[in-house]
């Protein structure tokens, strides 16, 4: 049974550069539910990453409200936001963003250690997460010694090791070959089926087959239906 | 959490090997230079105050104008009896310090500072612990003086007991060999007060200083005050105060203090910038990693601890390497007479300075990383 885990209520985001104000996201309302893989599709510069950043609590909205797991994000300070991200949200990035000096296992253990979990327990839980993405055989390798697909699988393990309620993926397949795209998306789909809320930002229409729900973003506007003048590049 | 920070900091250091070596070299060079300069400064200050430090009295009485024990003028020898009469004084001993020229059989010669005090106590020095050959009894013999092992090159290669030479044309011989009893700017030789007068042509109406011991239970400060109030033309100093005044006066009249101090300050400044800029550059290389750490939930305290953890590790490893180099320096310079000792508090202070350089150098990196937004990982 699905439930609402994140909520954006009439939220917008503006950036100021000198005298110029750029509206990255128009006032938007949407809900992210558990047990669903929500695809956020839009061309480059459309505002989809801004939307993801708002849900991911890495930026504050200029107006409106953002709620994650019943907590109003607008009211939290930087450290409280960091704690919320650590405990409730898992991130998967376009460029994998594994910590370069740490090997695969250490990368996956890191969020647990940030939570104050003991080294031994963190190691056991990280091993379980790596087993889930079938990366235990390469867990002692530094990220630079892994292929793009392998790095993304380690990144997924790192995102899910804290058992977050919501996982946010920013173009998770953009740097992968076709075979790796299927592997990574199947893994993400499986996590959604296990009850997690997954929000995947992409401009790749081929990923629609994995989605339970699709949100379209264009010029800062968000819609459940494709925009008429949408021109997505592949 | 702490162990996690230490482990992660170690991984960061090991991963960025070239820059880590750069930081380490900066710390080692700075710490070694500071340690070396401090060591030499301590050695020189030991030489400066050797005249006072080698004596075994509690209080020195010298002419009123002198602030440096190496530059005392003569005072009337009758002052010894006056000093002796001051309440609290146990025994007062006159001392004669005079200069001369020592000429050795091979034709070599050197300027000497001859220090004479009453036998058999030899209150002016040397101390028993410094005698490596002969004994105080040997100094009673005609022409007997001490010579120091480290001054042997000035004596034609040997300071061994038995060697004859001349002081200002008068026959003398080495009766006692000391080790580590050296003066600042001249070779020190100890003998009896009468012999010092003889070699230096000093009248028996004049003495250079009076060294005294206070009675058991008497207060040294009160004795000093009483002497300064009662006796005209002399000034009493507690031994430690005269030693400090001597070092202070020489350091700031010779320029040694300014020279050593400026070298230490420049070593600290250069270390600060080498470490700071290298750590900053290293932080720039790792911006993406720090941004990711913030995005996945690391708070600012963790990031700060991670950077300071690296700086702390650099300080510890750098200090150990610098200390080993300093030990090699001490070992290598000892045969030439440059005997450097680092008291434990100096080593502790040196480590604190190393830590300060390293941690303050991390400020550049901290400031840069503080500005990294977690949202930057999405760009």
Image: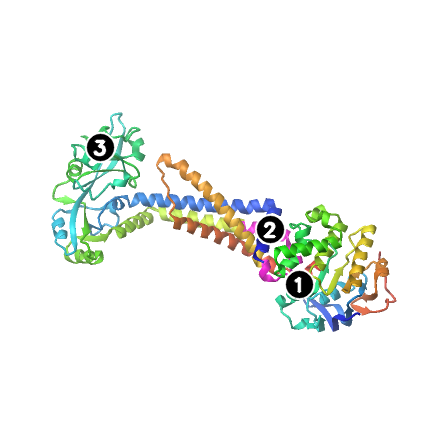
Q: Is residue B377 left or right of residue B251?
A: right
Residue at mark 2: B281
Q: Is residue B99 left or right of residue B357?
A: left
* B287 magenta-colored: yes
CB under 8 Å between callouts 2 and 3?
Answer: no
Quadrant of the image for the N terminus of chain A?
bottom right
Return the residue nearer the eye: B116 or B232: B116
Of all residues shown, which one is farthest toward the right? Answer: A228
Question: Which picture quadrant has residue A129?
Answer: bottom right
**Callouts 1 and 3 in the same chain:** no
Q: Position of residue B87 (x, y in %)?
A: 14, 56
> How far apart are labels 1 and 2 at the CA level?
28 Å
For label 3, count other residues whose C-alpha is less than 10 Å away and answer few (under 14), some (14-19) or many (20+): many
> How far apart are labels 2 and 3 at the CA level?
64 Å
Residue at mark 3: B175
From which residue to which does the magenta span run? B275-303
């Amino acid at each position: 049974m699905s439930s609402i885990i994140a909520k954006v209520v009439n939220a917008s985001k503006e950036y100021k550069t000198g005298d110029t104000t750029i509206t990255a996201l128009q006032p938007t309302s949407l809900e992210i539910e558990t047990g669903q893989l929500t695809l956020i599709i839009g061309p480059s510069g459309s505002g989809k990453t801004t939307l993801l950043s708002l849900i991911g609590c890495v930026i504050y909205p200029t107006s409106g409200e953002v709620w994650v797991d019943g907590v109003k994000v607008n009211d939290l300070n930087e450290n409280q936001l960091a704690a919320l991200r650590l405990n409730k949200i898992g991130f998967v990035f376009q460029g994998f963003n594994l910590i370069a000096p740490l090997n695969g296992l250490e990368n996956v253990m890191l969020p647990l250690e940030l939570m104050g979990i003991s080294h031994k327990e963190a190691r056991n839980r990280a091993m379980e997460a790596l087993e889930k993405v079938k990366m235990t055989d390469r867990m002692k390798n530094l990220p630079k010694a892994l292929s793009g697909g392998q790095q993304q699988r380690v990144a997924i393990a790192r995102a899910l090791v804290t058992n977050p309620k919501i996982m946010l993926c920013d173009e998770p397949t953009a740097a992968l070959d076709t075979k790796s795209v299927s592997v990574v998306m199947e893994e993400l789909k499986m996590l959604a089926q296990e009850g997690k809320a997954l929000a995947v930002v992409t401009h790749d229409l081929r990923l629609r087959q994995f989605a339970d729900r699709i949100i379209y973003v264009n010029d800062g506007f968000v819609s459940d239906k494709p925009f008429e003048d949408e021109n997505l590049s592949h | 959490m702490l162990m996690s920070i230490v482990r992660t900091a170690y991984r960061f250091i090991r991963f960025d090997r070239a820059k880590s070596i750069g930081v380490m070299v900066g710390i080692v060079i700075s710490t070694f230079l500071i340690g070396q300069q401090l060591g030499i400064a301590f050695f020189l200050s030991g030489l400066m105050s050797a005249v006072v430090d080698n004596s075994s009295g509690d209080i020195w009485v010298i002419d009123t104008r002198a602030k440096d024990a190496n530059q005392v003028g003569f005072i009337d020898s009758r002052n010894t009896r006056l000093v002796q009469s001051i309440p609290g004084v146990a025994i007062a001993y006159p001392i004669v310090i005079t200069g001369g020229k020592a000429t050795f059989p091979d034709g070599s010669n050197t300027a000497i500072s001859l220090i004479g005090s009453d036998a058999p106590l030899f209150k002016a020095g040397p101390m028993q612990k410094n005698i490596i050959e002969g004994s105080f009894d040997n100094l009673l013999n005609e022409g007997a003086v001490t010579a120091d092992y480290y001054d042997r090159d000035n004596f034609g290669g040997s300071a061994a007991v038995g060697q004859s030479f001349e002081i200002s044309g008068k026959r003398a011989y080495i009766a006692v060999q000391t080790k580590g009893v050296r003066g600042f700017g001249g070779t020190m030789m100890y003998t009896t007060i009468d012999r010092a007068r003889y070699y230096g042509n000093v009248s028996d109406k004049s003495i250079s200083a009076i060294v005294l011991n206070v009675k058991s239970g008497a207060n040294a400060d009160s004795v000093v005050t009483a002497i300064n109030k009662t006796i005209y033309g002399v000034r009493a100093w507690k031994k430690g105060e005269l030693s400090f005044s001597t070092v202070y006066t020489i350091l700031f009249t010779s320029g040694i203090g300014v020279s050593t101090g400026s070298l230490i300050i420049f070593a600290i400044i250069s270390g600060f910038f080498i470490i700071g800029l290298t750590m900053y550059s290293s932080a720039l290389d790792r911006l993406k990693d720090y941004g990711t750490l913030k995005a996945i939930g690391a708070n600012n305290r963790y990031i700060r601890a991670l950077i300071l953890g690296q700086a702390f590790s650099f300080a510890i490893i750098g200090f150990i390497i610098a200390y080993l180099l300093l030990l090699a320096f001490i070992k290598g310079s000892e045969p030439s007479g440059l005997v450097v000792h680092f008291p434990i508090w100096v080593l502790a202070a040196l480590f604190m300075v190393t830590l300060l350089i390293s941690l303050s150098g991390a400020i550049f990196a901290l400031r840069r990383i503080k500005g990294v937004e977690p949202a930057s990982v999405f760009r």
